Amino acid sequence: MIFKKFIFLTSFLMFSTLIFSQENLKEVTLKDAKGNPIQFSEVIKADKPVIVSFWATWCAPCLQELEAINDVYEEWQKTTGVTLYAVCIDDARSQSKAASIVKSKGWNYEIVYDPNHDLKRILNVVNVPNLLVYYKGNVIYKHSGYSPGSEDILYEKIKSAIKK
């Protein structure tokens, strides 16, 4: 009986956190690389898949993951219409370093900054790299950490979602 109550309470808390965080997304405005405001709740409503990848300049696995995706990103865009938002969680002082990395790597992602970790907190992202895939406003895939080849799984999840 105690176990059932525990399961119910845990499920309720997880569900209510999800609802609460989705409501708070309406309040999150990030800045892109040019300083333009990005209303995050609008970004994830796209009719095409949207990858939201949290990263930091000091995170080697983050850079490896974004580099691996970069190698196939153009093809992914052609076949699925996906857009990747690389959400940098570095503080304001480190943003120039992030911009330098993006430029040197030639990443063609939408780069946005979350220096106060507002989006990270609302989405309950604990560590980086961490990515979520949204399709028509719903999370269709989540992944934390990076290991070589995980970008292939990501691509399969995206293709599977758009076929439905």
Image (cartoon, helix red, strand yellow):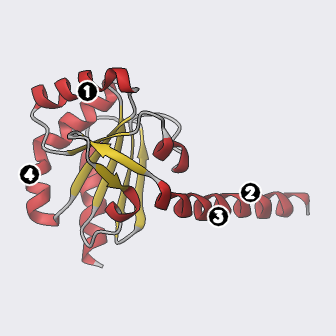
Question: How many residues crowd mark 2 within 10 Å: few (<14), some (14–19), many (20+)?
Answer: few
Instruction: Describe residue 99's horizontal placement relative to residue 15 as left or right.
Output: left
Q: Quadrant of the N terminus?
A: bottom right
Q: Which residue is mark 1?
A: 98
Residue 76 position within the rendered picture, expressed as x and y whole percent measured from the top left: 14, 56
Q: CA distance from mark 2 to mark 1?
A: 38 Å
Q: Amino acid at mark 4?
A: Glu
Which of pointers 3 and 2 lies earlier in the amino acid sequence? 2
Secondary structure type for disc 2: helix
Q: Nearer the viewer, mark 2 or mark 1?
A: 1
20 vs 119: above or below? below
Q: Nearer the viewer, mark 4 or mark 1?
A: 1
Q: Amino acid at mark 3?
A: Phe
Q: CA distance from mark 3 to mark 4?
A: 36 Å
Which of pointers 1 and 3 lies earlier in the amino acid sequence? 3
* x 41%, y 47%: residue: 143
Residue 144 position within the rendered picture, expressed as x and y whole percent measured from the top left: 43, 41
Q: Amino acid at mark 2?
A: Thr
Q: Amino acid at mark 1?
A: Ala
Which of pointers 2 and 1 lies earlier in the amino acid sequence? 2
Q: Which mark is residue 15?
A: 3
Q: CA distance from mark 1 to mark 3?
A: 34 Å
Q: Which residue is mark 2?
A: 10
Q: Which residue is mark 4?
A: 74
* x 29%, y 59%: residue: 50
Q: CA distance from mark 4 to mark 2?
A: 41 Å
Seen from the viewer's position, the closer of residues 47 and 12 is: 47
